[in-house]
Amino acid sequence: MASSKKKKQKPVKKSVVKKKLKTNAIKKIAQKLKIIPVRVAPKKVRINPLFQPLLAQLQRRRNEITGQVNHLEQDLRDEMIDNQNTPGDSADHGSGELSQHLSVTLMENDRIELERIERAISRIETGQYGQCETCEKSIPMPRLKAIPWATRCITCQSRAEA
């Protein structure tokens, strides 16, 4: 008779196994009920050589905006400290508040542009860039050069704005 050798396995704590099973079961139920979206890692796609210059342009602009926002935040902090420590009449304080409001508005505009840029970079990296989100036709290169974060062709964008 042949002797069978059994491999020794490390004992697994029952609590760890139960926790994993429970977590996996909850995830599956939540996915079926569409409570939690399934996270799928983005596919690595070879970047279209036509989009390389646009990707570089988007990355440069992202860096510029980040620098601008950091600068605006520092200026805003400095202005707030100056306004607190500087005596003055209501006109002086009103002027300071107006300047602060302008800084906040500029930062908000930069944040919106930064979100669009990040989305465009993500679309380039996943191979979806240059395709209209609405009609799925190709977005013409002149449009992408003019507005590198465009997600719709001119026709679909015109319809959306109307």
Image (cartoon, grey):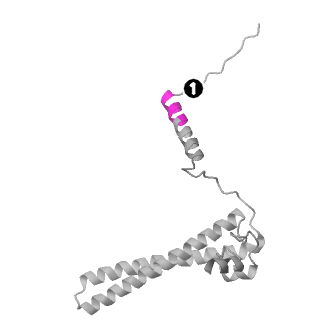
Task: Name the quadrant of the N terminus.
Answer: top right
Q: Callout 1, which amino acid?
A: Lys
**Vertical order, 86 against 70 (above or below):** below
Q: Which residue is mark 1?
A: 10
Residue at the image point whose x is 36% and y is 78% from the top: 77
Residue at the image point whose x is 70% and y is 57% from the top: 43
160 and 124: which one is in front?
160
Spot the residue most to the front. 162
Q: Is residue 14 magenta?
A: yes
90 and 61: which one is in front?
90
133 sits left or right of 90 in the view? right
52 and 153: which one is in front?
153
Label 1 neighbour load within 10 Å: few <14, some 14-19, many 20+:
few
Specify the quadrant of the image occupied by residue 50. Answer: bottom right
**Vertical order, 107 against 124 (above or below):** below
Residue at the image point whose x is 46% and y is 78% from the top: 107
118 and 143: which one is in front?
143
Q: Is residue 12 magenta?
A: no
129 sits left or right of 31 in the view? right
Question: Residue 147, position in %: x, y?
Answer: 66, 80
Observer able to see residue 74: yes
**Vertical order, 13 against 74 (above or below):** above
Residue at the image point whose x is 68% and y is 83% from the top: 146
Which contiguous range is marked in magenta? Answer: 13-21
Question: Residue 47, position in %: x, y?
Answer: 74, 66
Decide whether the magenta segment is chiefly helix, strand or loop. helix
Observer able to see residue 66: no
Question: Residue 25, position in %: x, y?
Answer: 56, 38
Question: Residue 137, position in %: x, y?
Answer: 76, 71
120 sits left or right of 48 in the view? left
